[in-house]
Amino acid sequence: MRIVRFTVDGESGRYGVVGNPIPDSTRGNGAESAASGPVVAELAGHPLGAIESIRLTGARFQLDEVRLLTPVVPGKIVAIGRNYAAHARELGNEVPAEPIIFLKPATAVIGPDEAIQRPADLSQRVDFEGELAVVIGKPAHGLAPEEAKDAIFGYTCANDVTARDLQAKDGQWARAKGFDTFCPLGPWIETDLDPGDLEITTTVNGEKRQQSRTSLLLHDIPALVSFVTSVMTLLPGDVLLTGTPEGVGPLEPGDEVSVTIENIGTLTNPVVDRP
């Protein structure tokens, strides 16, 4: 199931399920034909929790007629550094023996098609980092790896945007990864997914920059959930970024960066200098 958060005509955010096209019965002979694309069926209330309890309102919209928002509004974003060996090596770092965790603020989150704003007055090198993101569905603390699946609501695409020069300058990552707009998420949450071996690709202006598979994660998702929940409680709506593969590089104003993950979809964002 693909869960979206969307708005119609600028109204407040709603939740929905992306489904098959609405049949078109407007032809004179009454024959049905597929409409132009998928539809969004509106959900009643907040979807986080048990999938079987999700209810529909009956309202449906063409997907191309709504504006997609970030699919979740997280309380916190827990991210993992250097979780692909090739990425650790490309930046001259050792492969870590256990996960490196850091936090990104919720104010960094933006949705599909929203602009990543480079802080050009402070940073001369802002990089893309395509990643698989895990959305937590229920409170989780002290979980064993085999218990992790029960706490996961679904998965989405993420871009862990990073001011690389500030990361090197500061020696810790809060400023470099914490700017507003530095955590695009979307386009939706896929709830029915095996994340163990998915292709992940990042393109800039259509040119492929990153291509890898989640099977190459140094620490897999059950291990990450277990490790993080040994430190802090994860709550419904929290997001876990699982790390980026090799191929990271700079973004410039006017660029368009897309993160595509197999069986999920594509998250695309333009790049501008912040006002």
Image: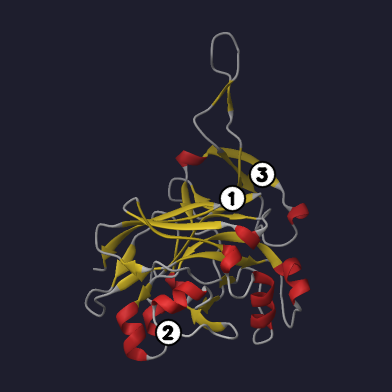
Q: Residue furthest bottom?
A: 171
Precedes in sequence: disc 3 or disc 1: 3
As shown in the figure, which amino acid type bears the numbered disc 3? Thr
Instruction: Give the residue drawn at x 59%, y 30%.
Output: 22
**Residue 60, relative to residue 226: is it above or below?**
above
Q: Do residues under tags 3 and 2 come within 8 Å of each other at their CB atoms?
A: no
Judging by the rendered image, the residue that carries numbered circle 2 is 174
Could you say whether the residue bearing mark 1 is in a helix, strand or loop? Answer: loop
As shown in the figure, which amino acid type bears the numbered disc 1? Asn
The Cα atoms of the two marked residues, 3 and 2, are separated by 41 Å
Could you say whether the residue bearing mark 3 is in a helix, strand or loop? Answer: strand
As shown in the figure, which amino acid type bears the numbered disc 2? Ala
- Neighbourhood count class around disc 1 (C-alpha, 10 Å): few under 14, some 14–19, many 20 upward: some
Judging by the rendered image, the residue that carries numbered circle 1 is 263
Q: Is residue 216 left or right of residue 179?
A: right
Could you say whether the residue bearing mark 2 is in a helix, strand or loop? Answer: helix
Precedes in sequence: disc 3 or disc 2: 3
The Cα atoms of the two marked residues, 3 and 1, are separated by 27 Å
Nearest-to-viewer mark from 1 and 2:
1
Residue 132 in picture, x, y percent from top left: 54, 64
